[in-house]
Image (cartoon, rainbow, N blue to C red):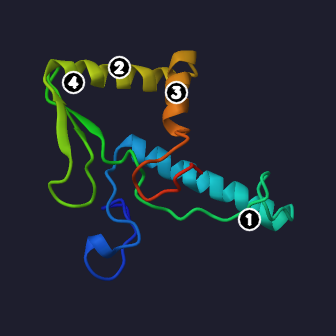
């Protein structure tokens, strides 16, 4: 859905297949990674006849879900002020504001500068964001514990 960033279903948003996800870059990038991995798996299953992973496990598609990092966002409140919320989800008023003020403004600048560097194919940005998007263990969220 283009308005809510979700997959709607019957009932309340808590019951939908994918509850509303914040429409900020990180969750979109995470959902894209899931979609890309699924396309690669479909290619192996349908066109190459590969049915298992390199370790012998059945090759299965990952379900789309609430990305583990979707509940973290820094909101700018001016050039020298911001707030950072972590642990938010689709439940109203969830999450905890854990950094605010000028330290968060610096945090937001670092995030922005490293993302721009990654998009410009810079080594620092690519190294930082590679490990963000290739987190080997997901401790919360709806995804697989050991990555995609």
Element type where label 1 sits in the image: loop
Rendered residue at 84%/63% (across/down): 47
Q: Position of residue 17 (x, y in %)?
A: 41, 72
For the residues labelled 2 and 1, the Cα–Cα distance comes to 40 Å
Q: Is residue 115 left or right of residue 108?
A: right
Judge by depth and name the residue closer to the eye, 56 or 118: 56
Label 1 vs 3, first from the N-terminus: 1
In the image, which is nearer the foreground, mark 4 or mark 1?
1
Rendered residue at 56%/17% (across/down): 122
In the image, which is nearer the foreground, mark 1 or mark 3?
1
Label 2 vs 4, first from the N-terminus: 4
Label 2 vs 1, first from the N-terminus: 1
For the residues labelled 4 and 1, the Cα–Cα distance comes to 44 Å
Q: Is residue 73 left or right of residue 28?
A: left
Rendered residue at 47%/47% (across/down): 138
Q: Which residue is mark 2?
A: 110
Q: Position of residue 7 (x, y in %)?
A: 40, 69
For the residues labelled 4 and 3, the Cα–Cα distance comes to 22 Å
In the image, which is nearer the foreground, mark 3 or mark 2?
2
Q: Is residue 121 visible?
A: yes
Extreme right residue here? 49
Q: Which residue is mark 4?
A: 104
Judge by depth and name the residue closer to the eye, 80 or 54: 54
Q: Which residue is mark 3?
A: 119
| Above or below, comparing residue 14 to residue 133 in the picture | below
Label 4 vs 1, first from the N-terminus: 1
Rendered residue at 56%/49% (across/down): 146
Element type where label 2 sits in the image: helix
For the residues labelled 3 and 2, the Cα–Cα distance comes to 14 Å
Q: Which residue is mark 1?
A: 58
């Amino acid at each position: 859905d283009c308005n809510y960033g979700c997959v709607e279903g019957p009932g309340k948003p808590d019951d939908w297949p994918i509850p509303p996800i914040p429409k900020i870059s990180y969750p979109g990038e995470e959902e894209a990674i899931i979609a890309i991995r699924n396309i690669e798996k479909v290619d192996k299953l349908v066109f190459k006849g590969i049915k298992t992973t390199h370790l012998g496990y059945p090759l299965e598609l990952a379900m789309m879900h609430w990305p583990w990092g979707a509940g973290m966002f820094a909101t700018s409140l001016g050039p020298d002020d911001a707030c950072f919320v972590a642990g938010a989800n689709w439940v109203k008023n969830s999450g905890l504001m854990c950094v605010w003020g000028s330290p968060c403004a610096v945090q937001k600048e670092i995030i922005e500068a490293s993302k721009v560097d990654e998009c410009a194919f810079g080594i620092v940005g690519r190294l930082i964001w590679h490990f963000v998007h290739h987190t080997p263990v997901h401790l919360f969220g709806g995804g697989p514990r050991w990555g995609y």
